[in-house]
Image (cartoon, rainbow, N blue to C red):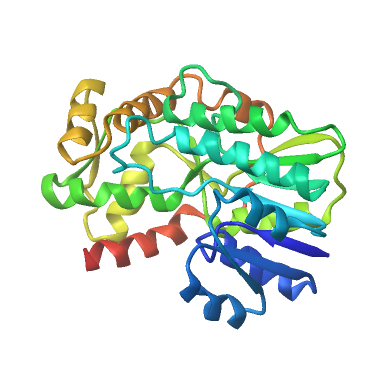
Amino acid sequence: MKIVLTGSLGHISKPLAITLIEKGHDVTVISSQEERSTAIEAIGATPAIGQLYDTSFLTETFMSADVVYLMQPPGIYFDKTPDPRMSWTHLANVYAEAVHDSGVKKIIHLSSIGAHTDTGVGMLAAHHKVESVLKELPPAVSIKFMRPVGFYYNMFAFIPAIKAQGAIIQNYGGDLQEPWVSPLDIAAVIADEIEAPFEGRAVRYIASDEASPNVVAKILGKAIGMPELKWKVVSDEDFLNGLLSNGINANTAKGLTEMNAARMKNLYDDYNKHKPEAGKVKLEAFAKDFAEVYSRS
């Protein structure tokens, strides 16, 4: 099949591209950086260099594709615009127009845990909006919404507090298990879904492992040589003020605070109703990567 991937050579798109190429598919990788062309070609894919918000570019690139993989780019935390999450909605509309105009009939969309609702999940409500935009495409366009849970590598954000205060500092915690996921498991699931039949609109959750905050602290602490590492819970207000003091955009800081609070409330409601089979990459394996990053920081 001819498959077009957004996400350049990121944490998910690169292993996804490699897997699809190994399976014999014709893969095109979209990137906004011309210098990525060589690396894209090196894995056996075709580079398509252009801007995601350029509808004409996307339409031309999507032409004749059997399947297109769509994702919203990360990196909005320090954006100084009033509400950087609006850019995701804008991009969703650009994607929808390009899909419609190119005639593509099969879409894989990287969404997120929390996309089942626009209430009480903080910044993740933006994914609900993005899904809603894509669902407005004609019924002839089949869409699979991939909803991974929290990425392991988001835990790298714990490192400054561990270094400065000797603890993981969050506005949630305790012994209630929550799911985490590796980008490698996300890529593996998406590769499988690309080859599976498409029909209508479908949702699939993706997770690698489950652990409570206290267990996370224990596993990460052991990996970095701090076996007594604790997960400390602070108030929403203190957590929010900490984000703001570190330069996080005000709307994003508020959204992150609300998202974390939702972990102990309604965030996993729909996930628990449609819990997936766990992936291969377990928390203990990620802890080794965490320790390496911790030692270099």
Spot occupied by residue 4 in the image (x, y as percentages of width and height): 70, 60
Between residues 17 and 229, which one lies in front from this camera angle? Answer: 17
In the image, what residue occupies the spot 60% across and 38% down?
A: 92
Looking at the image, can residue 172 be seen? Answer: no
Between residues 139 and 125, which one lies in front from this camera angle? Answer: 139
Between residues 168 and 157, which one lies in front from this camera angle? Answer: 157
Spot occupied by residue 183 in the image (x, y as percentages of width and height): 54, 56
Looking at the image, residue 171 sits to the left or right of residue 63; the answer is: left
In the image, what residue occupies the spot 58% across and 28% down?
A: 128
Q: Quadrant of the C terminus?
A: bottom left
Looking at the image, can residue 188 be seen? Answer: yes
Q: Residue furthest top?
A: 119
In this rendering, the answer to whether 89 lies above or below 215 is above
Between residues 228 and 127, which one lies in front from this camera angle? Answer: 127
In the image, what residue occupies the spot 15% across and 36% down?
A: 245
Looking at the image, residue 105 sits to the left or right of residue 83; the answer is: right
Q: Quadrant of the N terminus?
A: bottom right
In this rendering, the answer to whether 89 lies above or below 195 is above
Q: Residue furthest left?
A: 164
Looking at the image, residue 223 sits to the left or right of residue 281; the answer is: left
The quadrant holding residue 292 is bottom left
The quadrant holding residue 263 is top left
The quadrant holding residue 29 is bottom right
Spot occupied by residue 119 in the image (x, y as percentages of width and height): 50, 17
Spot occupied by residue 6 in the image (x, y as percentages of width and height): 60, 57
In this rendering, the answer to whether 203 lies above or below 61 is above
**Total numbered circles:** 0
In this rendering, the answer to whether 282 lies above or below 252 is below
